[in-house]
């Protein structure tokens, strides 16, 4: 058997990891040269093969090290984006609930006294009463706000499951799904605010001279921004996830 055939048979029988170990042993021990290379004139050939093996092993080790370091940095950034998204979504959902439930969407002056109203009640000094009229833009605003709250709430649940890597369902990507739900919530809030703003300006702007939007209304716009950034953060986290196969994250 020639030298090259001898080398190939050793590679095939030992495997890559053992072959790398053989190369290291050769470079570190003169005895291994005599055992692995019985041919007199084969020392230089085996030496060059040994150096090639060590070089390959060094490159592979370097790539593995930097690959793991890069993966660790990406996962750290991914969890930072998720944490920011959960914070914005949590605060945004709280503001959505407060905005929907409170009675300070707008204030206006009537009969020398200030009145204020929300989506469910209107208040005069000393008492508040439910809206008895079924007005289309009020109903639409209520419906959109409730849908926004629900979408954001389910987005938070799925977002927390993605953050702690809890996987009861493997048929969908939780990070991507949470981001989509935040965008849906943002879209519903935006619709609610647009409908209410347009109808209120057209109606109260002509009927009352002294009126203004109040803090419940402002909270609604703040929640638009927060839910939007929640979706952005989770989409960034989704892009940083390491590939694990289709629909299996």
Image: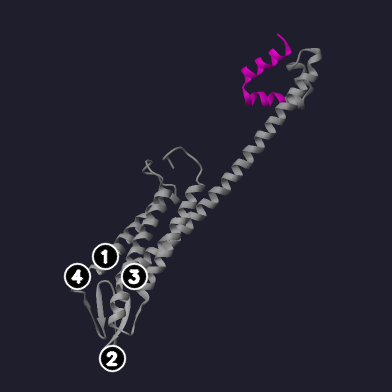
Q: Please provide percent x and percent y for residue 198.
A: 32, 71
Q: Which residues are magenta?
A: 1-24
Binning the other alpha carbons within 10 Å of mark 2 as few (below 14), some (14 to 19) or many (20 upward) gives few
Residue bearing mark 4: 134
Q: Earlier in the sequence, mark 2 or mark 1?
A: 2
Q: Residue at x 80, y 20 (%)?
A: 44
The image quadrant where one finds the C terminus is top left
Closer to us: 146 or 41 = 146
Residue bearing mark 3: 99
Q: Is residue 235 left or right of residue 43?
A: left
Residue bearing mark 2: 112
Q: CA distance from mark 2 to mark 3?
A: 27 Å
Q: Earlier in the sequence, mark 4 or mark 3?
A: 3
Closer to us: 98 or 17 = 98
Q: CA distance from mark 4 to mark 3?
A: 20 Å
Q: Evaluate whether residue 227 shows in this view.
A: yes
Q: Is residue 142 left or right of residue 49?
A: left
Q: Please provide percent x and percent y for residue 154.
A: 35, 55
Give the secondary structure at mark 2.
loop
Disc nearest the viewer among 4 and 3? 4
Binning the other alpha carbons within 10 Å of mark 4 as few (below 14), some (14 to 19) or many (20 upward) gives few
Disc nearest the viewer among 3 and 1? 1
Q: CA distance from mark 2 to mark 1?
A: 31 Å
Residue bearing mark 1: 140
């Amino acid at each position: 058997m020639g030298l090259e055939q001898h080398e190939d048979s050793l590679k095939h029988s030992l495997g890559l990891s053992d072959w790398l170990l053989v190369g290291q042993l050769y470079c570190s021990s003169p005895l291994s040269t005599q055992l692995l290379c019985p041919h007199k004139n084969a020392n230089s050939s085996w030496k060059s093969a040994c150096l090639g093996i060590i070089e390959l092993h060094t490159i592979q080790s370097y790539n593995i090290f930097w690959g793991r370091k890069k993966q660790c940095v990406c996962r750290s950034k991914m969890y930072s984006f998720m944490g920011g998204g959960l914070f914005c979504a949590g605060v945004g959902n709280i503001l959505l609930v407060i905005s929907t439930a409170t009675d300070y969407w707008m204030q206006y002056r009537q009969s020398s006294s200030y009145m204020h109203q929300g989506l469910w009640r209107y208040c005069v000094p000393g008492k508040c009463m439910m809206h008895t009229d079924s007005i289309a833009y009020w109903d639409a605003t209520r419906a959109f706000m409730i849908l926004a709250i629900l979408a954001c709430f389910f987005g938070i649940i799925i977002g927390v499951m993605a953050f702690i890597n809890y996987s009861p369902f493997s048929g969908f990507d939780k990070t991507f799904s949470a981001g989509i739900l935040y965008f849906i919530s943002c879209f519903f809030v935006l619709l609610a605010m647009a409908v209410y703003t347009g109808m209120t300006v057209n109606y109260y702007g002509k009927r009352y001279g002294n009126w203004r939007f109040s803090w419940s209304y402002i909270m609604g716009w703040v929640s638009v921004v927060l839910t939007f950034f929640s979706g952005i953060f989770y989409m960034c986290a989704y892009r940083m996830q390491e590939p694990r196969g289709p629909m299996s994250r």
